[in-house]
């Protein structure tokens, strides 16, 4: 697998995520995590704060700020991305049944990674 890849993960017939694969893990924004688990971004923000406050995972190793250009290519934005460890932690907190989607996501990631090796 190359260092950085972008793949499309089809959630269902109408929704998909554009996923960043970097350093052997998946990286999603708060908005993407909310879409994955069918909740609001504000809920994800609350859970992330509690996950880091409780020391469940280390923020330094699981959160990365990336710069990207806006749609018109004139302005740069800094966006936080969260790795698979945090995505799974959030999933458990959002709703146990919705967290089952993370297994599908993890299987998808593992099968995609296996194909690349």
Image (spheres, rainbow, N blue to C red):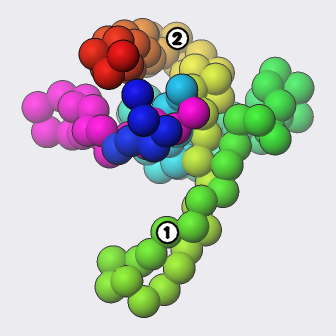
Please report whichever mark, 2 or 1, sits nearer to the chain's N-terminal start: 1
Whole-percent x, y for residue 61 in the image: 77, 35
- For the residues labelled 2 and 1, the Cα–Cα distance comes to 33 Å
The tally of labels here is 2
Whole-percent x, y for residue 72 in the image: 33, 85
Q: Secondary structure at mark 1?
A: strand
Name the residue nearer the viewer: 110 or 117: 117
Residue at which label 2 appears:
96
Relative vertical location of residue 93 with respect to residue 10 in this rendering, above or below: above
Question: Is 13 colored magenta in this rendering?
Answer: yes
Q: Residue at x 88, y 34 (%)?
A: 53
Extreme residue toward the bottom, this view: 74
Whole-percent x, y for residue 70 in the image: 41, 77
The magenta span reads 7-23
Residue at which label 1 appears:
68
Name the residue nearer the viewer: 18 or 94: 18
Relative vertical location of residue 7 with respect to residue 112 in this rendering, above or below: below
Q: Residues within 10 Å of mark 1 (few under 14, many from 20)?
A: few
Quadrant including the C terminus = top left
Relative vertical location of residue 29 with respect to residue 107 in this rendering, above or below: below
Q: Residues within 10 Å of mark 2 (few under 14, many from 20)?
A: few
Question: Is 65 colored magenta in this rendering?
Answer: no
Q: Residue at x 70, y 43 (%)?
A: 63
Extreme residue toward the left, this view: 13
Q: Quadrant of residue 116?
A: top left
Q: Residue at x 81, y 21 (%)?
A: 56
Say left or right for 44 vs 53: left
Relative vertical location of residue 32 with respect to residue 88 in this rendering, above or below: below
Q: Please, what is the dominant secondary structure of the magenta stretch?
A: strand
């Amino acid at each position: 697998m190359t260092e950085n890849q972008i793949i499309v993960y089809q959630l269902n017939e109408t929704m998909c995520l554009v996923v960043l694969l970097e350093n052997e893990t998946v990286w999603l924004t708060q908005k993407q995590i909310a879409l994955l688990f069918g909740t609001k971004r504000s809920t994800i923000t609350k859970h992330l704060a509690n996950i880091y406050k409780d020391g469940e995972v280390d923020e330094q190793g699981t959160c990365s700020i990336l710069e990207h250009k806006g749609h018109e290519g004139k302005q740069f934005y800094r966006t936080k991305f969260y790795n698979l460890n945090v995505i799974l932690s959030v999933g458990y907190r959002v709703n146990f049944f919705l967290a089952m989607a993370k297994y599908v996501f993890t299987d998808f990631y593992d099968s995609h990674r296996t194909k690349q090796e």
